[in-house]
Image (cartoon, grey):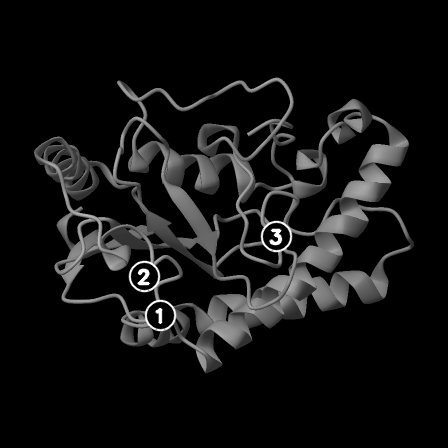
């Protein structure tokens, strides 16, 4: 929807601010046309839980925030990404940086902000989805992060771990990974509130004010379940289908 895609004059502290136009490169007509097409697509097709901020001063910079999907360890957390469109875009995929606040929350999201996704050319192995200049777009990247990275059982996103799906070892490892991921995600929420990425300050405050009750009651329930658990059980926040191993 319209409210989910907005323009801001500048994107303060953008990870890629010194690249592209920031390094003195100029926009070609083809680039400007491609970016306008992206903006139109984002304005009309963004899924629920994704917000995008385009930069009025810099066509090559975008900031996106994805709300952690329900029934995952990431539920209600906000995940912020800085995107950079290279001068020859869409012939090459965008560069994407994750605001990790120093934590490794997922096999595809690194502490240093690297986002591993075959669509971006940053994930090895048998790529199921590679960048196609004629078809691929920013919307596809954001939907892939939301649907293939922020999943109910992120443990199985680690390369090769999909072989453990359906085994006792896999269930045990996945549950442990999801429990520790949930704790890291709660810490990530607190850091997001205390060190908000502009211009999302008001949006972040409003989001957590609205979701505070749900988050606290979920934490209380999980704490109670953990105290009563005999040792075996479902993964925290799990219950969904196993994740695709090769986003």
Give how far apart the Cα atoms at labels 3 and 2 are: 20 Å
Q: Is residue 209 left or right of residue 241?
A: left
Q: Nearer the viewer, mark 1 or mark 2?
A: 2
**Which residue is rendered at x = 83% and y = 67% of the image?**
227
**Which residue is rendered at x = 60% and y = 26% of the image?**
246
The first of marks 1 and 3 along the sequence is 1
Q: Residues within 10 Å of mark 2 (few under 14, many from 20)?
A: some
Of helix, strand and loop, which one carries label 1?
A: loop
Split into 4 quadrants, where in the image is the C terminus? top right
Q: Is residue 189 left or right of residue 43?
A: right
Q: From this view, report whether residue 128 is shown above or below residue 162.
A: above
Q: Nearer the viewer, mark 3 or mark 2?
A: 2
Q: Relative to the observer, which residue lies in front, 205 or 236? A: 205
**Which residue is rendered at x = 79% and y = 23% of the image?**
163
Q: Is residue 138 left or right of residue 71?
A: left
Residue 80 in the image: x percent, y percent? 42, 59
Residue 133 in the image: x percent, y percent? 30, 22
The first of marks 3 and 2 along the sequence is 2
Q: From this view, report whether residue 99 is shown above or below residue 197.
A: above
Q: Disc number at residue 13?
A: 1
Report the residue marked by disc 2: 17
Residue 88 seen: yes
């Amino acid at each position: 929807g319209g409210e989910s895609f907005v323009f801001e004059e500048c994107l303060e502290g953008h990870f890629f601010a010194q690249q592209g136009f920031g390094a003195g490169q100029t926009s070609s007509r083809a680039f400007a046309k491609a970016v306008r097409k992206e903006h139109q697509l984002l304005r009309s097709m963004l899924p629920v839980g994704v917000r995008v901020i385009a930069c009025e001063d810099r066509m090559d910079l975008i900031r996106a925030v994805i709300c952690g999907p329900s029934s995952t360890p990431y539920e209600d957390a906000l995940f912020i990404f800085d995107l950079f469109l290279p001068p020859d875009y869409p012939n090459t995929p965008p560069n994407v940086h994750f605001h990790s606040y120093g934590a490794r929350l997922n096999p595809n999201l690194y502490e240093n902000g690297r986002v591993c996704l075959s669509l971006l050319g940053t994930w090895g192995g048998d790529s199921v989805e590679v960048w196609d200049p004629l078809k691929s777009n920013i919307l596809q990247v954001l939907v892939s992060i939301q649907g293939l990275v922020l999943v109910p059982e992120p443990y199985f996103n680690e390369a090769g771990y999909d072989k453990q799906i359906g085994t006792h070892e896999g269930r045990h490892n996945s549950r442990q990974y999801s429990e520790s991921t949930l704790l890291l995600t709660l810490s990530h929420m607190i850091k997001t509130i205390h060190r908000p990425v502009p211009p999302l300050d008001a949006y972040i405050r409003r989001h957590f004010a609205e979701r505070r009750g749900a988050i606290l009651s979920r934490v209380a329930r999980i704490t109670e379940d953990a105290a009563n658990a005999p040792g075996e059980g479902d993964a925290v926040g799990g219950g969904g289908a196993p994740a695709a191993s090769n986003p």
